[in-house]
Amino acid sequence: MSDVEVSRVSKRYDDLWAVKGVSFTAPVGSFTSLLGPSGCGKTTTLRLIAGFAALDEGEVRIGGRPVDALPPWRRNLGVVFQNYALFPFMTVFDNVAFGLRRRKVPRGETAERVAEAIDLVGLPDLAQRYPRQLSGGQQQRVALARALVIRPDVLLLDEPLSNLDAKLRAEMRFELKRIQRETGVTSIFVTHDQEEALTLSDQIVVMNLGTVAGAAPPKAIWEQPASAYVADFLGVENLFPGTVGDAARDDGTVAVSVDDSAAVLHVAATRPPGSAVVLGIRSEEVAVRRGGDMGEMDDGPNALDGTVREFTYIGSAIVYQVDCPALPGPLIATAQREFPVGDSVRLHLPPGAIKLLRPDAPAGGSGTRP
Amino acid sequence: MGDLFLRSGRGLVTAMAIFWLIFLVAPIVVTLASSFTSSTYLTFPPPGYSVRWYVSAFESEWVWSTFWNSVVIAVVSTAIAVALGIAAARVLARHRFHGRGLFEYAVLSPLIIPGVVVGFALLNVSVLIETQDAGLLNLIIGHTMVTTPFTLRSVWSSMAGSEISLEEAAQSLGATRWSAFWLIVFPLIVPGIVAGAIIAFTFSFNDVTISAFLSAREARTLPVELMSHIEYLPDPTPAAVSSLMIIVTLAFFLLVERTVGLDVFADR
């Protein structure tokens, strides 16, 4: 087992930086996710660690040892590919044994370790089958067994769950977690799915435009995203640029005016007056009730009137898109109660639920030009 | 409406089948039949039947010497074309580089340029570099040039793109670049190699246009010799040789389909 240190790593394709100055550390035995949209440089970063591509700047250390001069076959890493990359003309046994045979492991030990690995990943007795005779989930497990049987220093996973259907994906997520816990192998996992990253990781590295936009444990990144981009990627539906008003108020809140609108919202935070911020609030934190209904809720400072533009039923709740004249764009809110399209509603944004985020470049897919 | 469409489609297929019979199968049948003639000149239908022209073919020195020339040229040029095809296909499948499109067109151009032009151009080049008397060498170079597009295309299409991650997977598991190619990529592209090699070999063995320009006195291919024989002499020996070539080619394809064909294309 080894840790992985990625320091100021850059990779350029022609005149486009796929990765620019990326740094993070994956501690021994940890599970690190590289999260971001396609083209953000997460897969390139993984390929640089694996040695499939040569980096232009920076350094990768595995177990404290720089590996940049080593070819992939000398790095002792397990790699699981998005398309599994199983050798189609080899049986499951031969696929899993491939790495051991390259290492000249004796025949008897090979058979033993292959059986162990197949058992570890929870595969039934399929050793003599060919990959095309297996289901997607089984192929996934073979790919994992093949990568783990060589006892790699680090396990690299490139969107391994994205080709599975929803049910299987959820199941494999638990399986991945169990296997990683049982083997204790340092793992680096590339994904564009925030839920996968949150459920699996000890650390999430959010990437944007070839750079690191934020890195933190799942709970921290969920509760206090480093920037508006990170918040956007972690599913904060409502993001509005704003400016902090003059003075802090007695109740520990600041008044923040939403840009391009008349709305002023109170937020439980402290920021110097005049700071440019992005206000963020998750849909489920927004309270929705009927317009003009003076029910159980007291009109706080952050009450807004609006009209239901559209709604979608998601089973556990209803997600509303509400037009608020006071805001520059529609607000997304989640509620249990049903309101028809065109209904007047009153929204309440609790001061403690609004996050003040650092503004940054808008979410984007392609790399930056040097 | 749909019925009409279907019916006219069927009519088209029938018409195509009839055309195919008339223009491709009929000449073969005529050649085969007239090769068994008993007369001393080519006629159809033959006045009587005999195998005398087959005996004549086997006893003719010119048939044997040019046959061996053709075999050597076809084997060597196919081998080179396969090697070049694999190398070029790997470059095209894996790398994006400046001039990639140009490279692709340059390699594939012999498919578009008429054989007469290629043959004439190659003849001029060989005169320029004073190798016009090295007939065998010129023929091998010429045939390699024209058949490499076939091997490149078929090898390239057998590299479906997945072989890149397969190769990387093999490397991550401890296989060097070389062993990853031989253990993983090569078995995957064997069908493409076999298919390309068959086309290249058949093309080289049957080619007249390019070979006519490049054949020197001492190095003529069988089809070129057959053509000049037909031009100057009326005897039906060429018909017998042609029939043999047809039969051997058919047998060759059957053999490939029965052995390599079924073995290689299954289990994947």
Image (cartoon, coloured by chain):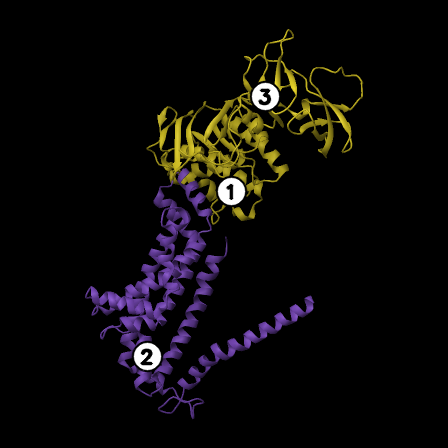
Q: Is residue B49 left or right of residue A229?
A: left
Q: Which residue is mark 3?
A: A242
Decide which of A226, A87 is in the foreground and name it: A226
Q: Residues within 10 Å of mark 1 (few under 14, many from 20)?
A: some
Same chain for marks 2 and 1?
Answer: no
Please state the chain letter of the residue tagged with numbered disc 2 in the rendered image: B
Please state the chain letter of the residue tagged with numbered disc 3 in the rendered image: A
Pair 3/1: label in front: 3
Q: Which residue type carries mark 2?
A: Leu
* Residue B143 drawn above or below residue A269: below
Decide which of B204, B258 is in the foreground and name it: B204
Task: Give SS at disc 1.
Answer: loop
> What letter labels the chain drawn in yellow?
A
Res A105 seen here: no
> Which numbered circle lies on residue A83?
1
Residue A196 drawn at (x, y percent): 57, 31
Res A127 seen here: yes
Residue at 25% from the left image edge and 67% from the top image edge: B124
Residue at 31% from the left image edge and 59% from the top image edge: B80
As measured in the structure, the alpha-carbon distance from the residue carrying label 2 to the one carrying label 1 is 54 Å
* Residue B149 drawn above or below residue A26: below
> Which numbered circle lies on residue A111?
none
Q: Which residue type carries mark 3?
A: Gly
Q: Which corner quadrant holds the N terminus of chain B?
A: bottom right
Q: Which residue is mark 2?
A: B226
Q: Is residue B7 left or right of residue A273?
A: right
For marks 3 and 1, the one nearer the N-term is 1
Residue B32 drawn at (x, y percent): 43, 82
